[in-house]
Amino acid sequence: MAERKLNSLGVRATIDETMRAEYERRLGQIRRDFEIGGNGLSLASSRSELVDELIGRLWAVELVAEPKLAKGITLAAIGGYGRAQLFPYSDIDLLFCAEKGEAVRAKDAIRRVSQALWDCGMRVSPMTRTLAECERFAPENAEFGLSLLDRRFLTGDTAIFAKLDDKIRNKMMARDAKAIRAEVASLTRERHAKYGDTLFHLEPNIKDCPGGLRDANVCGWLRMLQDPLSTTVSEGSEFEDALAFLAAARCFLHYRHERDDNTLDWLAQDAAAELRIGLGRRVGAGSGKVDAAYWMRAYFRYARIVERRLDRELEVNGLVQDSELRRVKLAPTSGFRLKDGRIVLDPAGAVDPAAEPDAVLAAFAAMAKTGAALSAESEERIAAALPRLSSHLEEGPALWSKLSAILTGERAGKALRAMHALGLLELILPEFHGIDALVIRDAYHRYTVDEHTFVVIDTLHGLGADPGPDAPEWRIKFRSMVRELQNPGLLYLAALLHDTGKGRAGENHAIESARMATGVLARLEMDAYDTSLVMRLIEMHLEMSAALRRDIFDAETVRAFAGKVQTHELLRMLTLFTYSDIQAVHPDALTPWKAENLWRLSMNAANQLDRNVDEERVNIRGRDERIARVLALLPKREAEVEQFLEGFPERYLKTRSPEEIRRHFEMTTHFEEEPFQVSCSYGTTMSEIALVTRDRPRLFAGMAAALAAWGMNVVTADGFANEAGVVVDSFRFTDTFRTLELNVSERERFVESVRELVAGRASVEKMLSGRRRARRRAPRITVETKIDFDETASSHSTLLQIIAQDVPGLLRAVSLTLSTLGHNVEVALVDTEGETAIDVFYLTHGGERLNPEQERDLQAALLEAIDENAS
């Protein structure tokens, strides 16, 4: 006995002396094979086989020293090692599983084997468990439970391994499958959240990022849980190609970093591209190399394949990631329905809705509205039907209507990402293809260009959400700006197209993006005014960021910036876009200080725009493109139209579409029938009413009073007069009591009532006295009333600016005060920013500016009226 133990110790000593050298030699050969062939999965398998062999030899030595160890204990590979995927610097998860009591006897042998493996240079994670400890899944130790799903016999007692395998299949996986699935889904969501729920990072972690190797493992676990008795998991060739690419990249990174580091930093991307890692057989550095941008696009496309496979496995296992989606409801719609939080396209007769553009785009609009994803089976049918969708896709206003419905949905980013992954977005907008997975390699950007675009849209929609009671003032203001947009779809379309120029060579991507957008807007056959707004926003989308790098309190900086923006609507859109564009570069890019400055620049520019309105008047002799567009809509009436436009403030032309101006002109032709022409357009969140009539006292005050009498809350308003004394007063308002929304039949009575009240044919005071005053909620922010006069803004008017708490009836109180004192409103500009009302009036009295005494009297009267209205 003593002689046998002595001999075994001699064998151990020999193995300890030679095993490390052998291990390093054979690892070197495995590495050379990889450098020649580039097959990462083959490398991982070869290293696993090598470690299998060495563990087998070490355990055999222990059996010679202690034959009783042949019974009651087994050695199993688990985790990545169990999948036979040992990458160059991967840890080795080794399980010693024993019958109860046997582990104590094997304690010294286990220690010696583990130490020998460490001495060879392996990072071993040994664990000893009894069979009973392996039959239950414990969420508090989920990592161990999940590692058991990938188990493989190495050596030892085969009967014990059979028992282990049986317990895992027929007890843990069968009994705890639901808990395991839930834990897998939870861990996956937590991991994805750490990476912003996107795979499109400029320096991604190819193991843990969405679409990485960990997600590929999750797919395998979920498939196994569907069929615990299955020994193989069949994957499609597309998925297998993706796995092969990621495996090759991980092997490359391990060798490059000489540790288990899976981050694709910039330098690693350069080197991987030069060696064509994952792109086929390599025959040496510099041979057939590709640039880093091309190689990273390959990475992102393979990662997207893994991400989509994971999404499908989660769906098959009933693991909709957002539990709230299960309660989402959709109105009955032809072509698709909602099932378990997924949108399912239902075949109807001989025509598959997955091949019909209207049905498909409607389904994505529903996704944008609800956040519910398409079912995997529906996605596959859409992908297969792309050629038919391409040939049947209708362009023009119909396509813009459908695209706008997607863009304006609260979850538009999710819908657009799905369309992008399927190739449908590029079908509609081929210009987008150039930025697919495009990397901008600098220290500023975090995401690829296409993902940055989607994050911009996500951020814009996020601004419309309630910021909460403790939100800073600028955040509340930005939410108000979102709600005040005349056509939000234009902002989202500009956001979608603003970086497409980055896919083309050129120094100024904004100009190139605008040039590419021209083709998009032409195909959508958008109105010239809307086209101009989108184009200008794309061309100028960097201007506000540039202005922020200057002194935003410098008058010349503000004046120069306002001169480029020109209109309040473009200023709103540019402010919101700039906020979202900066925020979407990197989560830490937009500091509270920068957001505060952005808001202040926007406010200063808005004030500047208001201070030059009265001086810039339309001059038909200096006819420009805007006037030409209006004249084109009214052929053979050019002289009449020119007379109508003459003398209006330039702002009237800049803030009205040609169609609106035509409508206003046509309203003047009906003065003989009814001198007070009123038109109203209704929206779900905002409505607009316009009065066109000949100038007379108290018109603006009458309109404000009429709206107040109906309980409408004025958000913005303006009033302009032309040289011939024709007035156009426009008020955008919200329906406080939803009167017109819930009672469509009341709309005609509303318009007629406003006309009668403005004309003085009905009593405003009587109607106001009959309306119960709603209880006002306490304001979040208290706004101090400020009244300022400016004699330098206009050569013939006095500018009055009022900043006050925005409360119902404020505009009526102000305008009534102006008319009571006999002041004439030449131009009126009314706006609200959150809970702040900013009202600007250009006033004259008897055709002259106000004198100092009139200004003092007016200030006192306004303060009294504002205070009385607020009480």
Image (cartoon, rainbow, N blue to C red):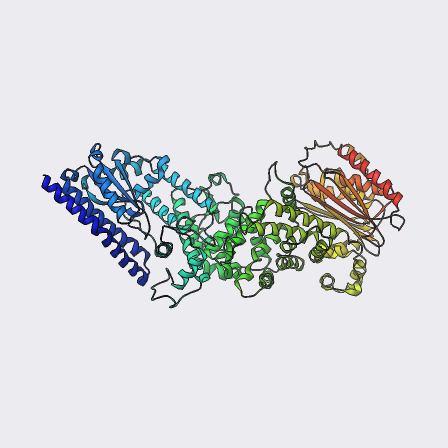
- Residue 389 makes an appearance in the image: yes
Residue 770 to residue 852: above or below: above
Camera-nearest residue between 713 and 346: 713
The quarter of the image holding the C terminus is top right
**Residue 697: horizontal and vertical position, in percent?**
85, 46
Left or right side of 529 for 376: left
**Residue 126: horizontal and vertical position, in percent?**
28, 41
The quarter of the image holding the N terminus is top left
Camera-nearest residue between 228 and 94: 94
Q: How many marks?
A: 0
Quadrant position of residue 453? bottom right
**Residue 703: horizontal and vertical position, in percent?**
78, 43
Residue 524 to residue 807: above or below: below
**Residue 836: horizontal and vertical position, in percent?**
71, 41
Left or right side of 224 for 470: right
Seen at 22% across and 49% down, the residue is 54
Quadrant position of residue 137? top left
